[in-house]
Image (cartoon, grey):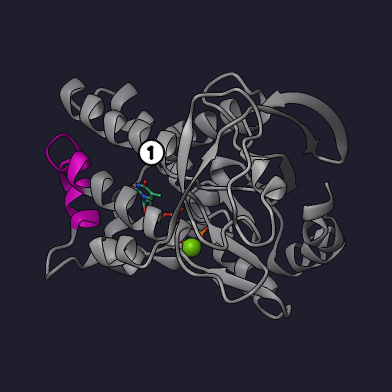
Protein backbone atom coordinates (compact mmCIF):
# COMPACT_ATOMS: atom_id res chain seq x y z
CA UNK A 1 0.00 0.00 0.00
CA UNK A 2 2.75 2.42 0.91
CA UNK A 3 4.22 1.79 -2.55
CA UNK A 4 0.90 2.84 -4.13
CA UNK A 5 0.76 5.97 -2.09
CA UNK A 6 4.35 6.90 -2.82
CA UNK A 7 3.47 7.02 -6.50
CA UNK A 8 0.66 9.41 -5.88
CA UNK A 9 0.97 13.05 -6.43
CA UNK A 10 -1.63 14.42 -4.09
CA UNK A 11 -3.70 17.44 -4.83
CA UNK A 12 -6.45 18.85 -2.72
CA UNK A 13 -9.82 19.51 -4.18
CA UNK A 14 -13.20 20.40 -2.81
CA UNK A 15 -15.98 17.83 -2.66
CA UNK A 16 -19.44 18.67 -3.81
CA UNK A 17 -22.79 17.06 -4.27
CA UNK A 18 -24.05 17.30 -7.81
CA UNK A 19 -27.29 16.55 -9.57
CA UNK A 20 -26.67 13.71 -11.94
CA UNK A 21 -28.63 11.58 -14.32
CA UNK A 22 -29.68 8.08 -13.40
CA UNK A 23 -30.18 5.63 -16.24
CA UNK A 24 -32.16 2.62 -15.11
CA UNK A 25 -33.30 -0.21 -17.37
CA UNK A 26 -33.84 2.11 -20.29
CA UNK A 27 -35.87 4.70 -18.34
CA UNK A 28 -34.15 7.90 -17.32
CA UNK A 29 -34.62 9.59 -13.97
CA UNK A 30 -33.06 12.60 -12.35
CA UNK A 31 -31.86 12.20 -8.79
CA UNK A 32 -29.76 14.04 -6.32
CA UNK A 33 -26.72 11.81 -5.98
CA UNK A 34 -23.33 12.30 -4.42
CA UNK A 35 -20.95 12.57 -7.33
CA UNK A 36 -17.36 13.70 -7.32
CA UNK A 37 -17.70 15.14 -10.76
CA UNK A 38 -15.86 18.29 -9.87
CA UNK A 39 -12.76 16.78 -11.43
CA UNK A 40 -13.97 17.89 -14.82
CA UNK A 41 -13.75 21.41 -13.53
CA UNK A 42 -10.07 21.02 -12.76
CA UNK A 43 -7.79 22.73 -15.20
CA UNK A 44 -5.66 20.76 -17.65
CA UNK A 45 -2.49 21.15 -15.65
CA UNK A 46 -4.13 20.06 -12.40
CA UNK A 47 -4.03 23.35 -10.63
CA UNK A 48 -6.51 23.60 -7.82
CA UNK A 49 -9.85 25.22 -8.43
CA UNK A 50 -12.12 25.98 -5.51
CA UNK A 51 -15.47 24.86 -6.81
CA UNK A 52 -17.86 25.56 -3.99
CA UNK A 53 -17.91 26.49 -0.36
CA UNK A 54 -17.62 22.93 0.91
CA UNK A 55 -14.97 22.43 3.54
CA UNK A 56 -14.22 18.88 2.43
CA UNK A 57 -10.90 18.33 0.71
CA UNK A 58 -9.74 15.13 -0.95
CA UNK A 59 -6.47 13.59 -1.97
CA UNK A 60 -6.41 12.98 -5.69
CA UNK A 61 -3.94 11.09 -7.79
CA UNK A 62 -2.50 13.28 -10.50
CA UNK A 63 -4.33 12.53 -13.74
CA UNK A 64 -7.42 11.02 -12.10
CA UNK A 65 -9.42 14.04 -13.15
CA UNK A 66 -9.10 12.94 -16.77
CA UNK A 67 -9.92 9.23 -16.80
CA UNK A 68 -13.46 7.87 -17.01
CA UNK A 69 -14.25 5.11 -14.50
CA UNK A 70 -16.95 2.46 -15.04
CA UNK A 71 -17.71 -0.15 -12.35
CA UNK A 72 -19.36 -3.45 -13.25
CA UNK A 73 -21.53 -4.60 -10.36
CA UNK A 74 -23.72 -7.61 -9.63
CA UNK A 75 -24.20 -10.68 -7.47
CA UNK A 76 -21.57 -13.44 -7.22
CA UNK A 77 -21.43 -15.23 -10.62
CA UNK A 78 -23.66 -12.65 -12.30
CA UNK A 79 -21.24 -12.42 -15.23
CA UNK A 80 -19.02 -9.47 -14.34
CA UNK A 81 -15.81 -11.05 -15.63
CA UNK A 82 -17.53 -12.06 -18.89
CA UNK A 83 -18.73 -8.49 -19.34
CA UNK A 84 -15.20 -7.18 -18.76
CA UNK A 85 -13.80 -9.70 -21.23
CA UNK A 86 -16.26 -8.48 -23.84
CA UNK A 87 -15.14 -4.86 -23.38
CA UNK A 88 -11.46 -5.80 -23.26
CA UNK A 89 -11.64 -6.11 -27.05
CA UNK A 90 -12.42 -2.40 -27.28
CA UNK A 91 -9.50 -0.08 -27.72
CA UNK A 92 -9.07 2.79 -25.25
CA UNK A 93 -10.51 0.76 -22.36
CA UNK A 94 -8.38 -0.63 -19.60
CA UNK A 95 -9.93 -3.61 -17.86
CA UNK A 96 -9.24 -4.01 -14.15
CA UNK A 97 -10.41 -7.40 -12.93
CA UNK A 98 -11.12 -8.23 -9.32
CA UNK A 99 -8.09 -9.14 -7.19
CA UNK A 100 -9.62 -12.49 -6.19
CA UNK A 101 -6.28 -14.31 -6.57
CA UNK A 102 -4.95 -12.07 -3.79
CA UNK A 103 -7.94 -12.88 -1.58
CA UNK A 104 -7.13 -16.57 -2.03
CA UNK A 105 -3.45 -16.15 -1.37
CA UNK A 106 -1.98 -13.47 0.83
CA UNK A 107 1.50 -14.59 1.85
CA UNK A 108 0.37 -18.20 1.73
CA UNK A 109 -2.97 -17.68 3.53
CA UNK A 110 -6.45 -17.96 2.00
CA UNK A 111 -8.71 -15.42 3.74
CA UNK A 112 -11.55 -16.09 1.26
CA UNK A 113 -11.71 -19.77 2.25
CA UNK A 114 -11.32 -18.90 5.94
CA UNK A 115 -14.20 -16.44 5.74
CA UNK A 116 -16.55 -19.06 4.25
CA UNK A 117 -15.44 -21.59 6.91
CA UNK A 118 -15.97 -19.23 9.85
CA UNK A 119 -17.37 -15.77 8.95
CA UNK A 120 -17.62 -14.66 12.57
CA UNK A 121 -13.88 -15.13 13.07
CA UNK A 122 -12.48 -14.31 9.63
CA UNK A 123 -15.00 -11.89 8.08
CA UNK A 124 -13.06 -8.85 9.23
CA UNK A 125 -9.80 -10.34 7.99
CA UNK A 126 -11.12 -10.90 4.48
CA UNK A 127 -13.02 -7.62 4.29
CA UNK A 128 -10.07 -5.56 5.49
CA UNK A 129 -7.96 -7.07 2.76
CA UNK A 130 -10.72 -6.70 0.14
CA UNK A 131 -10.99 -3.02 1.06
CA UNK A 132 -7.24 -2.51 0.68
CA UNK A 133 -7.01 -4.31 -2.65
CA UNK A 134 -10.06 -2.49 -4.00
CA UNK A 135 -8.51 0.83 -3.04
CA UNK A 136 -5.38 -0.18 -4.92
CA UNK A 137 -7.52 -1.00 -7.96
CA UNK A 138 -9.32 2.36 -7.88
CA UNK A 139 -6.00 4.16 -7.66
CA UNK A 140 -4.18 2.10 -10.27
CA UNK A 141 -2.50 4.16 -12.97
CA UNK A 142 -4.68 4.08 -16.08
CA UNK A 143 -2.97 3.74 -19.41
CA UNK A 144 -6.25 4.24 -21.32
CA UNK A 145 -8.80 7.07 -21.05
CA UNK A 146 -11.51 4.67 -19.82
CA UNK A 147 -11.00 2.31 -16.89
CA UNK A 148 -13.49 -0.51 -16.33
CA UNK A 149 -13.42 -2.08 -12.87
CA UNK A 150 -14.90 -5.37 -11.68
CA UNK A 151 -16.86 -4.24 -8.62
CA UNK A 152 -15.68 -1.39 -6.39
CA UNK A 153 -14.67 -0.47 -2.89
CA UNK A 154 -18.29 0.69 -2.50
CA UNK A 155 -19.95 -2.68 -3.10
CA UNK A 156 -17.39 -4.46 -0.92
CA UNK A 157 -18.59 -2.29 1.95
CA UNK A 158 -22.25 -1.66 1.14
CA UNK A 159 -22.99 -5.25 0.10
CA UNK A 160 -20.55 -7.75 1.63
CA UNK A 161 -19.62 -6.07 4.92
CA UNK A 162 -23.24 -5.03 5.38
CA UNK A 163 -24.41 -8.58 4.73
CA UNK A 164 -22.02 -10.09 7.27
CA UNK A 165 -23.06 -7.55 9.87
CA UNK A 166 -26.82 -7.70 9.30
CA UNK A 167 -26.83 -11.51 9.31
CA UNK A 168 -25.17 -11.48 12.73
CA UNK A 169 -21.95 -12.98 11.36
CA UNK A 170 -19.78 -9.94 12.02
CA UNK A 171 -19.36 -8.61 15.55
CA UNK A 172 -20.35 -4.97 15.98
CA UNK A 173 -16.80 -3.93 16.88
CA UNK A 174 -15.43 -5.41 13.63
CA UNK A 175 -18.13 -3.60 11.67
CA UNK A 176 -17.31 -0.34 13.46
CA UNK A 177 -13.59 -0.61 12.70
CA UNK A 178 -14.19 -1.44 9.03
CA UNK A 179 -16.66 1.42 8.76
CA UNK A 180 -14.19 3.87 10.27
CA UNK A 181 -11.60 2.80 7.68
CA UNK A 182 -14.10 3.04 4.83
CA UNK A 183 -15.36 6.45 5.92
CA UNK A 184 -11.83 7.80 6.23
CA UNK A 185 -10.89 6.52 2.78
CA UNK A 186 -13.96 7.83 1.00
CA UNK A 187 -13.90 11.16 2.81
CA UNK A 188 -10.24 11.83 2.18
CA UNK A 189 -9.36 10.14 -1.10
CA UNK A 190 -10.82 11.06 -4.45
CA UNK A 191 -12.27 7.80 -5.91
CA UNK A 192 -14.26 8.91 -8.93
CA UNK A 193 -16.88 6.68 -10.57
CA UNK A 194 -18.67 7.84 -13.72
CA UNK A 195 -21.02 4.93 -14.31
CA UNK A 196 -22.19 1.79 -12.54
CA UNK A 197 -23.31 -1.05 -14.81
CA UNK A 198 -25.51 -3.33 -12.72
CA UNK A 199 -25.83 -6.87 -14.07
CA UNK A 200 -29.19 -7.77 -12.58
CA UNK A 201 -29.75 -11.48 -12.09
CA UNK A 202 -31.99 -13.70 -10.05
CA UNK A 203 -30.25 -15.43 -7.14
CA UNK A 204 -31.29 -18.77 -8.68
CA UNK A 205 -29.36 -18.03 -11.87
CA UNK A 206 -26.25 -17.17 -9.86
CA UNK A 207 -26.62 -20.34 -7.82
CA UNK A 208 -26.74 -22.44 -11.00
CA UNK A 209 -23.68 -20.68 -12.42
CA UNK A 210 -21.81 -21.09 -9.14
CA UNK A 211 -22.44 -24.82 -9.14
CA UNK A 212 -21.21 -25.06 -12.71
CA UNK A 213 -17.98 -23.16 -12.24
CA UNK A 214 -17.20 -24.93 -8.97
CA UNK A 215 -14.74 -22.54 -7.32
CA UNK A 216 -13.44 -24.54 -4.35
CA UNK A 217 -14.08 -21.90 -1.63
CA UNK A 218 -17.62 -21.24 -2.89
CA UNK A 219 -18.96 -24.81 -2.66
CA UNK A 220 -20.49 -23.95 0.70
CA UNK A 221 -22.53 -20.97 -0.59
CA UNK A 222 -26.28 -21.67 -0.18
CA UNK A 223 -29.01 -20.01 -2.24
CA UNK A 224 -30.03 -17.94 0.81
CA UNK A 225 -26.64 -16.21 0.82
CA UNK A 226 -27.10 -15.14 -2.81
CA UNK A 227 -30.63 -13.97 -1.98
CA UNK A 228 -29.29 -11.70 0.76
CA UNK A 229 -26.64 -10.24 -1.54
CA UNK A 230 -29.33 -9.74 -4.20
CA UNK A 231 -31.62 -7.83 -1.80
CA UNK A 232 -28.78 -5.57 -0.72
CA UNK A 233 -27.95 -4.82 -4.37
CA UNK A 234 -31.57 -4.06 -5.19
CA UNK A 235 -31.86 -1.72 -2.18
CA UNK A 236 -28.67 0.04 -3.19
CA UNK A 237 -28.91 0.34 -6.98
CA UNK A 238 -32.61 -0.07 -7.82
CA UNK A 239 -34.62 1.22 -4.87
CA UNK A 240 -31.96 3.73 -3.69
CA UNK A 241 -32.97 3.06 -0.10
CA UNK A 242 -29.69 2.06 1.53
CA UNK A 243 -26.22 3.47 0.90
CA UNK A 244 -25.15 6.43 -1.27
CA UNK A 245 -24.90 5.68 -4.98
CA UNK A 246 -21.66 7.18 -6.30
CA UNK A 247 -22.62 7.41 -10.00
CA UNK A 248 -25.47 6.96 -12.49
CA UNK A 249 -26.67 3.35 -12.79
CA UNK A 250 -27.25 1.42 -16.00
CA UNK A 251 -29.17 -1.81 -15.36
CA UNK A 252 -28.65 -4.77 -17.70
CA UNK A 253 -30.95 -7.77 -17.08
CA UNK A 254 -28.48 -10.67 -17.04
CA UNK A 255 -30.33 -13.93 -16.49
CA UNK A 256 -29.89 -15.17 -20.04
CA UNK A 257 -27.29 -17.40 -21.66
CA UNK A 258 -23.87 -16.27 -22.84
CA UNK A 259 -24.84 -15.60 -26.46
CA UNK A 260 -27.76 -13.38 -25.45
CA UNK A 261 -25.60 -11.61 -22.88
CA UNK A 262 -22.97 -10.79 -25.51
CA UNK A 263 -25.76 -9.39 -27.65
CA UNK A 264 -26.97 -7.24 -24.73
CA UNK A 265 -23.48 -5.86 -24.12
CA UNK A 266 -23.38 -4.98 -27.81
CA UNK A 267 -26.76 -3.20 -27.51
CA UNK A 268 -25.59 -1.17 -24.50
CA UNK A 269 -22.09 -0.62 -25.77
CA UNK A 270 -22.53 2.94 -27.05
CA UNK A 271 -24.45 4.04 -23.99
CA UNK A 272 -21.66 2.70 -21.78
CA UNK A 273 -18.82 4.12 -23.82
CA UNK A 274 -20.32 7.57 -24.08
CA UNK A 275 -20.65 7.79 -20.31
CA UNK A 276 -18.39 10.79 -20.15
CA UNK A 277 -21.11 12.68 -22.04
CA UNK A 278 -23.93 11.71 -19.64
P1 LIG B 1 -17.46 -11.70 -7.03
O1 LIG B 1 -16.96 -10.36 -6.67
O2 LIG B 1 -18.91 -11.79 -7.22
O3 LIG B 1 -16.69 -12.17 -8.32
P2 LIG B 1 -17.05 -13.33 -9.34
O4 LIG B 1 -15.86 -13.51 -10.21
O5 LIG B 1 -17.51 -14.50 -8.54
O6 LIG B 1 -18.26 -12.76 -10.16
P3 LIG B 1 -18.56 -12.91 -11.72
O7 LIG B 1 -18.81 -14.36 -12.00
O8 LIG B 1 -19.79 -12.07 -11.89
O9 LIG B 1 -17.37 -12.39 -12.45
O10 LIG B 1 -17.02 -12.69 -5.88
C1 LIG B 1 -15.77 -13.29 -5.71
C2 LIG B 1 -15.78 -13.98 -4.37
O11 LIG B 1 -15.39 -13.07 -3.34
C3 LIG B 1 -17.15 -14.49 -3.95
O12 LIG B 1 -16.99 -15.73 -3.30
C4 LIG B 1 -17.65 -13.46 -2.97
C5 LIG B 1 -16.39 -13.00 -2.32
N1 LIG B 1 -16.41 -11.63 -1.81
C6 LIG B 1 -16.49 -11.41 -0.45
O13 LIG B 1 -16.63 -12.36 0.34
N2 LIG B 1 -16.41 -10.14 0.02
C7 LIG B 1 -16.30 -9.05 -0.81
O14 LIG B 1 -16.24 -7.90 -0.33
C8 LIG B 1 -16.24 -9.28 -2.23
C9 LIG B 1 -16.13 -8.11 -3.18
C10 LIG B 1 -16.30 -10.58 -2.68
MG1 LIG C 1 -15.37 -12.36 -11.78
Above or below — where is 169 with respect to 154?
Answer: above
> Overall secondary structure of the magenta stretch?
helix
Q: Is mark 1 within 8 Å of ligand 1?
A: yes
Location of residue 171 by image quarter: top left
Task: Look at the numbered disc 1 and give the secondary structure of its residue.
Answer: helix
Above or below — where is 268 with respect to 165?
Answer: below
Range drawn in magenta: 111-125
Q: From the image, which quarter does the N terminus lie in?
A: bottom left
Using residue 88 as the reference point, say whether residue 212 is left or right of it. Answer: left
Q: Which residue is mark 1?
A: 160
Using residue 226 as the reference point, say whether residue 125 is left or right of it. Answer: left
Using residue 197 as the reference point, say whether residue 227 is left or right of it. Answer: left
Image coords of residue 227 (percent x, y): 48, 34
Image coords of residue 258 (percent x, y): 69, 67
Image coords of residue 56 (percent x, y): 48, 29
Above or below — where is 218 with respect to 93?
Answer: above
Out of 132 and 189, give the one closest to the viewer.
189
**Can residue 216 be seen from the camera position used here?**
no
Q: Is 118 part of what is drawn in magenta?
A: yes
Amino acid sequence: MSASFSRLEFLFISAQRAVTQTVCGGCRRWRQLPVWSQRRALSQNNTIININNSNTEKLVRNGDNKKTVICIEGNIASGKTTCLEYFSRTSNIEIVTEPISKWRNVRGHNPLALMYQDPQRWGITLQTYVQLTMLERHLSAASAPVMMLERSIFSAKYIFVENLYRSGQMPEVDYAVLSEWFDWITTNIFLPVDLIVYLQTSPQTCHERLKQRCREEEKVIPLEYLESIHQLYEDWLIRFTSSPVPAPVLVIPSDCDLQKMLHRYEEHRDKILTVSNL
